[in-house]
Image: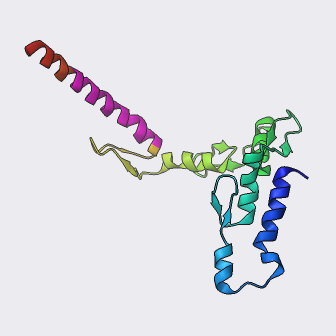
Amino acid sequence: MSSAETMTSKLQDEASGGGQQLDGASKAAKKAHLCPQCGKNFRELGGLKNHLLIHSGEKPFPCAQCGKRFRKKGQLVCHQRTHSGERPFTCRDCQKSFREAGHLKRHQSIHSSLELFVCQVCRKSFRLASFLKQHQRVHQREVLYIKSRKERKQLLYT
């Protein structure tokens, strides 16, 4: 039995209350599953089980083609698409396809006229937070340039 399985078994015994019936208030208190190593809380025992794999370093799901290992089966399934070329998530607007649902979701914002992220300096708007963050560097460089210019003037005229 692995260390993660041993820890999970102990946690299941604790969560079950040792076979005792729990009243409503006690059940609510038992909803939180605490990681004994780092203190992180989980609502579901399954979330804690997956989390414990991080501490143990265990990666029980190997890729049959290249041998790379994963903590979660979903990560393996996604990885296997790199070998198969499968792209099951397709944009309804332009038919471009993606390996992961999150990549499709990010892509779909280009078809939207909504621009949800607004620069507080110049009011320019962007569809993605990452585009706004990249744009904000322009203003950071401007501030650095202005500061250095002021400093040069102070040095020259004092």
Q: Is residue 44 above or below residue 52?
A: below
Image point (87%, 50%), residue name: 2
Q: Can you name the residue that lies furthest to the right here?
A: 1
Task: Judge left or right: residue 153 versus residue 32.
Answer: left
Q: Quadrant of the C terminus?
A: top left
Magenta stretch: give its range.
Answer: 130-148
Which quadrant of the view contains residue 125?
Answer: top left
Q: Is residue 80 above or below residue 137?
A: below
Main structural element of the magenta stretch: helix, strand or loop? helix
Q: Is residue 156 above or below residue 39?
A: above
Image point (47%, 41%), residue name: 130
Residue 135 % position (x, y): 38, 35
Q: Is residue 92 above or below residue 67?
A: below
Which quadrant of the view contains residue 143?
Answer: top left
Image point (33%, 44%), residue name: 119
Instruction: Find out whether residue 138 is within the magenta segment.
Output: yes
- Snapshot colouring: rainbow
